[in-house]
Amino acid sequence: MHTQVAIIGGGPAGLLLGQLLHQAGIDNIIVERQAREYVLARIRAGVLEQGTVNLLKKVGVSTRLEKEGLIHHGFQIAFQDESLHINLTNLTNGKNVTVYGQTEVTKDLVEARAKEKLLTVYEADEVTLHDLEEKRQKVTYFHQDNKHEITCDFIAGCDGYHGVSRSSIPQSAIKEFERIYPFGWLGLLSDTPPIDPELIYGKHVDGFYLCSMRSMTRSRYYIQCALNEDINQWSDDRFWDSLRKRLPTDLQMNLVTGPSIEKSIAPLRSYVVEPLRFGNLFLVGDAAHIVPPTGAKGLNLAASDAHYLSEALIEYFHKNSNAGIKQYSSQALSRIWKAERFSWGLTNLLHRFPGQTGFDQKMQEAEFSYLKSSENARRVLAENYVGLPY
Ligand code: APR
Ligand code: PHB
């Protein structure tokens, strides 16, 4: 088999890139390790920047998003006993974010791909990349015990943090930057109405919490937990009690609890690899970078990477120009580092760090107090939250 672009990984980065390329007449095959049902069932975050929504509209997969997505004009920060409203729309000249689960984005993209009869190989084992520095590359994999081979002009590594793409690059050709945080998030999904129409990011002496949602009947809550926490020790009741204790007193009685649909622990990490290109392999999305979820930037960065790479490949195939693909890494990294900075900053403000000193606590308090007192400070926060321009 031959294709112009072999896409490794069928998560949101690979799927969106595939649609953007297909729309420009560039053929592509997605090779995904997991089964389709597994990919569709993964629960992830759910706040979309306007830029992400625009890309989904551009590739014609926004019908359900426009019907079911919730436009949010602001969010709350609850810091110990105080509360601050961030009015995104007023602070950013009319911008906002859309609450729509990544699970739903993935479903819409998978359906669009199937409708166009574009090839996605699911359950591909031992995916291996060859000849990355040659003019033509090769991807091999096993499917139901048979070995297959795809030749291609480019490979897009969209296979997430644990994928094969980044690890196919010699260590000497890349540099990695990382911060691992000494805590995780324990998340719970339930079919209960959200506590508030807007998201609440909170800081309490027990640690961070987030009240989020998927719809007006489905809530997503998180609480900061220790890294070595055992999920089996967390009954739904224990989770609800811990969350309720962290909430501002006036909101505690609004919390509607119910059985969990999903409960999981995620570690927090900041990570970037540079550059995003090795020969004719390009890294996109979580394969290239991880942000702590505090700024809701993971999916949005995957979307902006897919946008930059699609433009670069379109320039290559349509105009026979290398200029775009030469620029892809530096162009995408410039936006990635700013989102890293934002997610790191918000994580530092809202979490309780083990061994935190009195000075560290005062820094967090001063930062919250500055946000309260300065519209400029709130504007900076809002500008980053709605997403920096492409
Ligand atoms: N071969 C083929 N596919 C692979 C391999 C491999 N060796 N390793 C992983 N994959 C697949 C995974 O099964 C997954 O479906 O690559 C896909 C990567 O998808 P994501 O992890 O969702 O990453 P990405 O598409 O970059 O989306 C970023 O997802 O993790 C969240 O916070 C993140 O919201 C962000 C978004
Ligand atoms: C979520 O709804 O899962 C969510 C929302 C906002 C975040 C992180 C996660 O910052």
Image: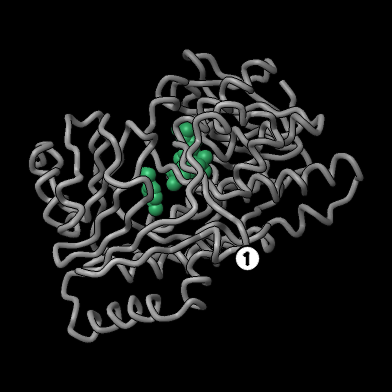
Residue 119 versus residue 245: which sits nearer the camera?
A: 245
Residue 277 versus residue 272: which sits nearer the camera?
A: 272
Residue at figure coordinates x 76%, y 32% from the top left: 4
> Is residue 13 shown above or below 176?
above
Residue 209 versus residue 316: which sits nearer the camera?
A: 209
Q: Residue furthest right?
A: 319
Q: Is residue 244 visible?
A: yes
Residue at figure coordinates x 31%, y 83% from the top left: 366
Residue at figure coordinates x 66%, y 41% from the top left: 55
Numbered-mark total: 1
Residue 293 versus residue 77: which sits nearer the camera?
A: 77
Q: Quadrant of the N terminus?
A: top right
User: Would you name the residue on which mark 1 appears?
Assistant: 334
Residue 35, horizontal then vertical, whole percent: 44, 21
Instruction: Identify the coloring.
Output: one colour
Residue 345, horizontal then vertical, whole percent: 40, 70
> Is residue 135 shown above or below 269?
above
Lateral position of residue 312 relative to residue 141, left or right: right
Question: Mark 1, residues whose alpha carbon is within 10 Å: few (<14), some, or many (≥20)?
Answer: few
Q: Is residue 283 visible?
A: no
Residue 178 in which image quadrant: bottom left
Instruction: Find out if the beta carbon at label 1 lies less than 8 Å from the nearest ligand 1 atom.
Output: no
Residue 341, horizontal then vertical, whole percent: 48, 69
Lateral position of residue 381 relative to residue 95, left or right: left
> Is residue 19 shown above or below 211?
above
Lateral position of residue 312 relative to residue 98, left or right: right
Secondary structure beneath disc 1? helix
* Amino acid at dot 1: Ser
Residue 368, horizontal then vertical, whole percent: 33, 75
Q: Quadrant of the C terminus?
A: bottom right
Residue at figure coordinates x 81%, y 42% from the top left: 314
